Image: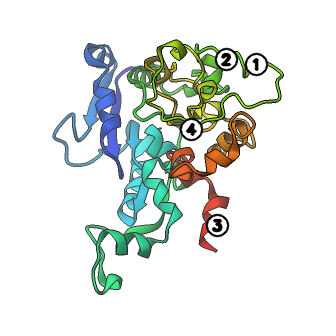
């Protein structure tokens, strides 16, 4: 890592959970401060604006408003290196699910006013939610909801040579320790005839793949790298690390449905409440073709 670099943390439309993850490095932040100076961060210090010519700027949140777009462009001008942090910045995240609807539909539902055309709100909503890389050049990505605290350290320690950081290219299934007996067998039958609630717990199945239990899991179309932190505590993957990097894998939702349609009965999948909300929870914004389909 280059010595005496300036580091900042900024946010667009977000919950600030990613910045909390940065603080979760705890006492290791002292190691960071040996070679880096923290100069901006709303939850870290009282600084009014991002300073000019900052070396490394982490940015969380989706681009959901006109103000977000202006801020993203300003951050890009001020930062030598810009890093997207969290699912919202990397893929649009949960705010991106409003791309299923038109802007006026959202306003009419949330703010039931007589004349919706005059409502501007605290800031003007953009016509669709975008990820940070969709609007400005982004030098690196730290996915997750929230990201792993140690990944912040990795980025800072490798500044400015981010190409030395080797991100996983396989799906979460490759690093998941749950048993996959049926999935690895050449059989012509569904692994389960039921789609179960994710909190349907059976001690006898505790170490069995969620899909083999009949529980929907996004790991089949989600990039590895989280260490399986959710599945290790009996919670199925929900896809916050985004799609794997292979060409043709960008549509995470379609990847999940395609993968599990031969494992679980498709007819039962269609009866699940908010299936699209499940499979596109974090990455709808980066599926431009799907947005076009819904808006034409």
Number of residues whose C-alpha sits closer than 10 Å to that of mark 3, classed few (under 14), some (14–19) or many (20 or more): few
Q: Position of residue 246 (x, y in %)?
A: 72, 36
Q: Is residue 110 visible?
A: yes
Question: In whole angstroms, how far apart are the C-alphas of marks 2 and 1?
Answer: 6 Å
Q: Viewed as shown, does residue 292 lie left or right of 247?
A: left
Question: In whole angstroms, how far apart are the C-alphas of marks 3 and 1?
Answer: 37 Å
Q: Position of residue 102 (x, y in %)?
A: 49, 71
Rendered view: 121 above or below 217: below
Q: Tell me which label, 3 or 1, sits earlier in the chain.
A: 1
Q: Viewed as shown, does residue 284 lie left or right of 71?
A: right
Pointer 4 residue:
242
Pointer 1 residue:
184
Question: In whole angstroms, how far apart are the C-alphas of marks 1 and 4?
Answer: 24 Å
What residue appears at the point 82 percent right and 24 percent down from the top-left corner? 187
Pointer 2 residue:
180
Work out whether residue 154 or residue 221 is closer to the camera in this orientation and state it.
221
Pointer 3 residue:
292
Do labels 2 and 1 touch, CB within 8 Å?
A: yes
Q: Secondary structure at mark 1?
A: loop
Task: Name the mark on residue 143.
Answer: none
Do labels 3 and 2 touch, CB within 8 Å?
A: no
Picture quadrant where residue 26 is located: top left
Number of residues whose C-alpha sits closer than 10 Å to that of mark 4, classed few (under 14), some (14–19) or many (20 or more): many
Image quadrant in which the C terminus is located: bottom right
Q: Position of residue 139 (x, y in %)?
A: 53, 38
- Give the number of the mark in front: 3 or 1: 1
């Amino acid at each position: 890592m280059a010595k005496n670099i300036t580091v900042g943390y900024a946010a667009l439309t977000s919950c600030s959970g990613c910045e909390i993850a940065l603080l979760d490095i705890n006492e290791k932040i002292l190691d960071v401060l040996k070679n880096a100076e923290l100069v901006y961060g709303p939850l870290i210090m009282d600084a009014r604006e991002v300073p000019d010519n900052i070396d490394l700027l982490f940015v969380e949140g989706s681009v959901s408003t006109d103000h977000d777009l202006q801020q993203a462009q300003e951050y890009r001008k001020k930062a030598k290196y810009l890093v997207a942090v969290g699912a919202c910045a990397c893929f649009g995240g949960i705010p991106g699910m409003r791309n299923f609807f038109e802007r006026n539909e959202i306003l009419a539902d949330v703010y039931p006013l007589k004349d919706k055309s005059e409502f501007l709100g605290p800031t003007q909503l953009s016509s669709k939610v975008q990820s940070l890389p969709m609007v400005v050049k982004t030098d690196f990505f730290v996915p997750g909801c929230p990201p792993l605290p140690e990944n912040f350290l990795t980025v800072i320690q490798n500044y400015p040579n981010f190409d030395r950081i080797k991100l996983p290219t396989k799906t979460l299934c490759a690093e998941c320790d749950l048993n996959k007996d049926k999935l690895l067998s050449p059989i012509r039958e569904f692994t389960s005839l039921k789609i179960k609630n994710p909190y349907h717990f059976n001690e006898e199945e505790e170490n069995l793949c969620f899909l083999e239990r009949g529980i929907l899991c996004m790991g089949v179309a989600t990039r590895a790298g989280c260490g399986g932190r959710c599945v290790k505590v009996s919670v199925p993957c929900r896809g916050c690390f985004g799609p794997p990097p292979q060409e043709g894998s960008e549509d995470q939702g379609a990847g999940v449905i395609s993968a599990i349609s031969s494992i679980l009965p498709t007819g039962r999948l269609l009866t699940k409440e908010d299936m699209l909300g499940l499979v596109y929870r974090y990455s709808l914004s980066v599926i431009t073709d799907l947005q076009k389909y819904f808006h034409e």
